Image (cartoon, rainbow, N blue to C red):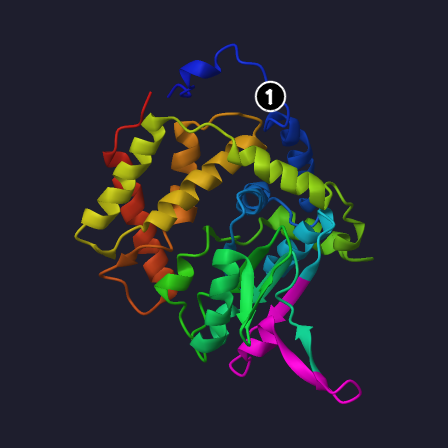
């Protein structure tokens, strides 16, 4: 299939701050993180897509495959603040967003901010916390602010939540509600490394942790500039219509109880722009949409035949989305 290019892009010069100006540094960032996440450049790129698009990331996979390491390496290579929250059944909302503590010396209450006040926040095993605690993230993820005791406090810029959950373990867990799943821009599955990659991982950790060798590639200001640049990427009306046909078919499919929301459609457009920017383009192509449909939509649709197992639901959602994409004509 020929890559679709907007007519007004032919012969157009790159503007100041154009995506092409950030592509080289963003791809160096992927290579830097690749030092510790072996053989998963596609996963690293998609994680970076979520960050550049100002979205949040859900990593659903078994323990021990590098979910925490990925979030930590992303923060370190960008010189961003990083906090890890281990979600448990006794975790309280105040443990996440913060609480006011009485100071006996001053006779006043002082605000002690929680770990949510960081650029990248790892919500580890998010489905182990109660719905009340999980809901403490909703405002933060949607509006980049938290409200407590009648006061609203802004979160740092940039801000990203990277949440993990184990699809194979269901004892003592609380499934994420659809309203919360919808706030994650992308959901990824890291997967096991190959035998050669796993061997290299073991050798690399014989002396020290490779994450200690991660170098800063972009400053906080550079990342914000890349985010603003990605927002200016062109998306033609034909691609928007293509996306909306896919969205509409998820709502009409008899095997689907809950289709993709307008927030989901906006998330795919934003992530497609970010992907184009990372690849040095000032415009989106149809392959950007096709590449992101599964990680952007699969966790947003509710399959009527889904079993109680999370991994079965994921497989059914992926299957339905692939069938829908095959039925929609690609703009050329």
Tell me what residue is drawn at x 44 percent, y 68 percent. 168
Query: Which of the 4 image quarters holds residue 65?
Result: bottom right
Which residue reaches farthest top? Answer: 11
- Per the image, the residue denoted by label 1 is 15
Tell me if residue 137 is in the magenta stretch. Answer: no
Span highlighted in magenta in the image: 83-108
Tell me what residue is drawn at x 31 percent, y 24 percent. 331
List x then y, in percent, for residue 98: 62, 74
Which residue reaches farthest bottom? Answer: 104
Q: Nearer the viewer, residue 94 or 147?
A: 147
Side of 19 relative to 180 (left or right): right
> Relative to 26, does residue 116 appear above or below in the rendering?
below
Tell me if residue 97 is in the magenta stretch. Answer: yes
Q: Quadrant of the C terminus?
A: top left
> Relative to 271, does residue 258 appear above or below in the rendering?
below
Tell me what residue is drawn at x 50 percent, y 57 percent. 143
Residue 173 showing in the rendered view: no
Q: Nearer the viewer, residue 25 or 41?
A: 25
Helix, strand or loop under label 1: loop
Dot 1, crowdedness within 10 Å: few (<14), some or many (≥20)?
few
> Relative to 291, does residue 192 appear above or below in the rendering?
below
Residue 181 showing in the rendered view: yes
List x then y, in percent, for residue 320: 27, 48
Q: Nearer the viewer, residue 11 or 309?
A: 11
Tell me what residue is drawn at x 58 percent, y 37 percent. 228
List x then y, in percent, for residue 41: 59, 41
Which residue reaches farthest left? Answer: 254
Side of 215 relative to 290 (left or right): right
Query: Which of the 4 image quarters holds residue 83?
Result: bottom right
């Amino acid at each position: 299939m020929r890559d679709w290019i907007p007519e007004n892009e032919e012969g157009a010069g790159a503007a100041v701050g154009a995506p092409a100006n950030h592509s080289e540094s963003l791809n160096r960032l992927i290579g830097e993180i690749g030092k510790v996440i072996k053989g998963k450049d596609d996963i690293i790129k998609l994680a970076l897509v979520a960050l550049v698009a100002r979205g949040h990331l859900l990593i659903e996979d078994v323990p021990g495959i590098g979910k925490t390491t990925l979030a930590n390496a992303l923060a370190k290579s960008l010189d961003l603040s990083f906090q890890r929250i281990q979600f448990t059944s006794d975790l309280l909302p105040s443990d996440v967003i913060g609480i006011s503590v009485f100071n006996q010396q001053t006779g006043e209450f002082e605000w002690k901010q929680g770990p949510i006040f960081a650029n990248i926040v790892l919500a580890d095993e998010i489905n182990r916390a109660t719905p009340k605690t999980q809901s403490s993230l909703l405002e933060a993820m949607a509006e980049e602010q938290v409200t407590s005791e009648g006061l609203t406090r802004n979160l740092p810029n940039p801000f990203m939540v990277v949440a993990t959950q184990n699809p194979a373990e269901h004892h003592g867990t609380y499934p994420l509600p659809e309203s919360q799943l919808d706030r994650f821009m992308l959901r990824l599955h890291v997967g096991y490394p190959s035998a050669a990659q796993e061997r290299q991982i073991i050798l690399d950790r014989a002396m020290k942790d490779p994450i200690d060798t991660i170098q800063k590639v972009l400053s906080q200001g550079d990342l914000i500039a890349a985010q603003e640049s990605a927002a200016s990427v062109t998306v033609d009306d034909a691609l928007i219509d293509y996306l909306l046909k896919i969205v509409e078919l998820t709502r009409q499919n008899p095997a689907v109880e809950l289709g993709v929301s307008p927030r989901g459609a906006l998330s795919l457009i934003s992530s497609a722009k970010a992907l184009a920017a990372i690849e040095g383009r000032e415009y989106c192509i149809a392959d950007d949409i096709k590449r992101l449909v599964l990680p952007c939509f699969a966790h947003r649709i509710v399959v009527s035949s889904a079993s109680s197992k999370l991994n079965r639901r994921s497989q059914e959602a992926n299957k339905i989305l692939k069938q829908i994409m095959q039925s929609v004509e690609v703009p050329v």
